[in-house]
Image (spheres, rainbow, N blue to C red):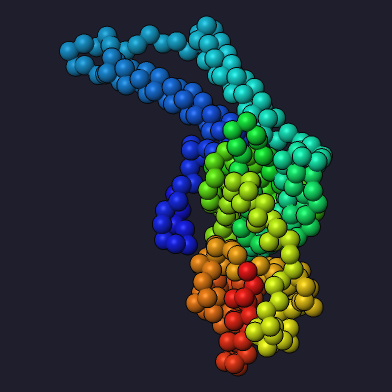
Amino acid sequence: MLLADDCTTENLSIFDPVSPHARAIANLSNLVFAVTGLIFIVVCGILLYSLWRFRSRPDDPSTEPAQVYGSQPIEVAWTVAPALIVFFLVLITTRTLWDVNADPPLPHPNDGALFVTVVGRQWWWEYRYETYDGRPLGFVTANELHIPASEPGTERPVYLKLESADVCHSFWVPRLAGKVDLIPGRTNRLTLVAEEQGTYLGQCAEYCGTQHANMLIRVVAQNPADFDSWLANQSLPAREDPAMSEGKQAFLAQSCINCHRVRGTPAQGGYAPDLTHLMSRQTLASGQIKNTPEDLNHWVRDPQQIKPGSLMPAFGLPTRDHDLIVRYLNSLH
């Protein structure tokens, strides 16, 4: 269980899966716990029986058990039995790993599959949407991964390509899939299939620096119609609002554009989150705070107060410029 940004506890248990791959991992975990638990009970039972059966008795000096040191049958038994158990668990584990790490297919029309490249950064997630249902997408979002949920009789797999822009990270949404590392210079892969709609939380599971603990993950599984609507909105450039022209110019005049991108404007930075549809997200700062006008105002004014160690500094802008920029950002739906 984890304390989320809205101060409610969220289900992060691997034993409550909503994906075939997560279910395979949960089943394997249950089997391992059952086997090791049975061994623990048997060993403890033998130990307790031995302590009771052969306890010291002042009136009975003959209670010392028979000495079995060098007994060949016993040596064979306690060597072969553990070896068979380990062999059995290795076979089951290998089969599970084979199933959950199968290579993704190539995208093709009407396949119902979503392909996304996930880039881990200190300390946020970049999602590059590649194709869906065989159609090219080509836009980028941050920190909230929207995916289509499967329907009865129609599976909608999500194939993730995992990369890192700086240090080692690890992508882990326990109810959807296992943990896979993002390693600089290497590409790993992960497959998700959400069987139910909902928001699933996760966490970077590899220590990656100061704000590692606050590098949270949100996966929003939507019904296909809602997901199509979300895709259509995200594919568009930033909405032009004449009432926000002064705020837009204030934003473009600052060094914000060196790191952030707002599609349809000269802001084309690729180092920090894409802000094109910023206010369509539920949270800011990788799940740290809710995405409300008030929290956005606090975040822009002093990011270090909310997320110490964040690579976004406090610029100390004049109040008028600050207010104009925040109002402009609030218009980016």
Residue at horizontal 45%, vertical 22%? 39
Q: In this view, does 306 lie to the left or right of 248?
A: left
- Camera-nearest residue between 222 and 250: 222
Q: In this view, does 272 lie to the left or right of 298?
A: right
Residue lying farthest to the left in this orientation: 59
Q: Picture coordinates of residue 195 (x, y %)?
A: 57, 38
> How many numbered circles does the render carry?
0
Residue 14 appears anywhere in the view: yes
For residue 315, what is the image quadrant? bottom right
Against 249, residue 265 (above or below) is: above
Against 62, residue 323 (above or below) is: below
- Camera-nearest residue between 211 and 112: 112
Against 146, residue 310 (above or below) is: below
Against 215, residue 333 (above or below) is: below
Residue at horizontal 59%, vertical 92%? 320
Quadrant location, the C terminus: bottom right
Q: Picture coordinates of residue 248 (x, y %)?
A: 69, 83
Q: Picture coordinates of residue 157 (x, y %)?
A: 68, 39
For residue 323, what is the image quadrant? bottom right
Residue at horizontal 49%, vertical 29%? 30
Q: Picture coordinates of residue 86 (x, y %)?
A: 59, 22
- Camera-nearest residue between 100 and 169: 100
Residue 163 appears anywhere in the view: no
Residue lying farthest to the top in this orientation: 73
- Camera-nearest residue between 59 and 187: 187
Residue at horizontal 52%, vertical 37%? 17
